[in-house]
Image: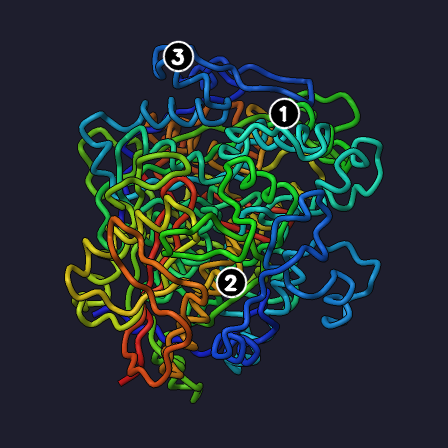
Amino acid sequence: MRIFIRSAAQISIQNPLCDEWFENPIFYSQTHNRSIDPDFKSFIPIMEARRMGRVMKRAIVTSKSVIPEENRATLDAILTGTGLGSVEDTEKFLNALLKNDEEMLPPSNFMNSTHNTIGSIIALNFKCHGYNLTSAHRGTSFDSICFDAYLQFLKGAKNILVGGHDEMTADYFALFDQIGFWKKEPFTADTLKESSTKGTFAGETAVSFWLSAEDGGDSLCSILGVDLLYKPSQQRLQESLDTMLAQSGLTRDDIDAIVLNCNGDVENDTVSREVAEAILPNVQQLYYKHLFGDSFTMSAMGLYISAVCLHRREIPAHLIYRSGAGNKRPRTFLLHNHYQNKDHSFMLLSV
Amino acid sequence: MAKRVVITGMGIVSAIGVGKDAHLCALMKGKSGVGKIRYLQTKHTDIPIGEVKMSDDEMKLLLGIAPESVITRTPLMGKIALKEAMQDSGITDASRVAFINGTTVGGMEKSEKYYMDFFEGKKTDYIAAHDCGAGTDMIAETFGKFDLITTLSTACSSAVNSIIMGGDLIRSGRVEAAIVGGAESLSKFHLNGFNTLMILDRKVCNPFDAQRNGLNLGEGAAYIVLESEESAKTRNANILCELKGYGNACDAFHQTASSPTGEGAYLAMKKALEDAGLNSEQIDYVNAHGTGTGNNDLCESVSIQRLFGEKIPHFSSTKSFTGHATSAAGGIEAVISILALLNDFVPGCCQFQSPIEETGLVPVKGCLKNVNLQNVMNNSFGFGGNDSSCIFSKIR
């Protein structure tokens, strides 16, 4: 089966709603970074926007950017991956709860605090009654929902909106800092590659994709397979890849690059490198979190940068993690993601 | 022809007990688990809730977990239900089994307790236990081995969406078995959240009654084991019933309220019927979402009338027994629906007196025994209009 990525849009710590990161990436050396937001006014009426937190506004903007108006109400599914939902609303309600001793609390923050608010606000905006699902499974929240998209296409879906959305507030950043999520020592995008210490740096994610069963002639690339695995053995990873390749009529030699979730955290990156070397030795390795930072749904950005590279048939030098074999004009990528070496995922992409 | 998906095991813990036998007994006797707050720390002690009648420490003891281990309440309940479901199914090797868990509140019940400590570098082990996936991860570790796991979070319909995704997974051939459902503990956070929305009843809730006055929150965990019919037959498993069909639709009307036409609910039920290849007359019992709020019960009644017309099947809500266990509700009610199906009874709305004026629909009052049930429908609706429905059928 071939699922076409008809369009994609991102808001992140790189310039939003464009691909300037391809030619002129912004490099960060701070651990806490918030996305560069576009002007929301041109997408959402001011009164409406006032009731929404950032994560929701970004989700609306990226969703509207990828789905043409005439396709919105008839989408077969709106699928959302988010590790934490609207952290801003959750924190506002929690702080009020603790400060006011369970009195005089803001109901709207509570309403917005559930993870599925993002997906349902999109549905509300699009007047779409289709299948609507949200996955919240740590570092594979987005991968899980892509996997569900794959299942929906198998069942005959024609058009699906898929998104990955997470924000990182100052308070949540501070909490994650307590448990060693962020780098303690100075770093640059270059030093992350050779890092021998724990921790990474934070970014925020808002990425949406229009996935379709039809090419439409303007697709960025296509998804050939998606798989999720829990604590897989090396043999199980190999088996999953082989199944995916066989179903697509491809072999490992067709893969031009493996896209890894390397983020400068030595434990995370060691796992990624070991997987890459085991399943695709010598194939060039790409990374993206050195440009976008990390969040629970940053793997959505992995899909995004891969789709752009395959569409342009070009890999910018700054995405290369380890050079190796692979076509200069790439046709096929394998995306690998894992969270703490427990949940793993694969996605196979081709032009 | 899509693969037939059957149920080969289930496990449950809720306000009315631990295990499916305890549930069957409480439902038949009409014994509600909703009552005065005992374990949750809150100042709103006048609000009745459906708590699982065990402290965290008692659950740890039951599970053989060290008292000092870092674990939140949701995964404790999840582990109890998962163990029962696995034992019931007879599956000993889960290495090719999927586990899909529905949850929303996550570790909030500990985060709200230790939030200020976190910033001072205390109790920091609970920081990583806060998110939804953390709970699923802790539950999955009970067995160490699954082929894939994930967490779905669509508020109060999370568990039914897990059932739906599990069904799709098996039909696709990706796995032969999937353990699906949900787990959710009470928290001060969402008790206060629902309280600010002014939809909490100060007495035991009274779903579908004209005088209904809101919902009671509850907690618990429940899982069912879905399996392809071939796999179940190959290993001579005890097949309980079939997952005949399911549907998910979005109301796309309001963030928390349901539309007056019950569009999302109607579409979810209609899709479930179509998927099952059944017509509406073939549904013998609907275990409704029936929270007891003015808005939900009216909209759900309207959607039931739209779908079933003049021939309304038996319907009831079991939330006056268990309370509304939010993300776990769909799992708990799936198990209750299957118990009803297998034992040919309908658990009733224990306090019902007068029908909603606009629809005149009368739910089953008290426990109705010796009814011949072939197909039962289980509804679960969430915030944001995330509406889902699934149908369980006897194996002919």
Q: Which residue is mark 3?
A: A46
Mark-to-mark CA distance, 3 and 1: 23 Å
Q: Residue A24: x percent and y percent?
A: 49, 13
Q: Residue at image x 46%, y 52%?
A: B158
Q: Residue B254: x percent and y percent?
A: 36, 34
Callout 3 secondary element: helix
Q: Which residue is mark 1?
A: A169
**Residue type pointed to by label 1:** Thr
CA neighbours of label 2 inside 10 A, class few (<14), some (14 to 19), many (20+): many
Q: What is the number of the mark on residue B99?
A: 2
Q: Nearer the viewer, mark 3 or mark 2?
A: 3
Label 2 chain ID:
B
Callout 1 secondary element: loop
**Residue type pointed to by label 3:** Ile
Image quarter in which the N terminus of chain B is found: bottom left
- Which numbered disc flags the more N-terminal residue, 3 or 1? 3
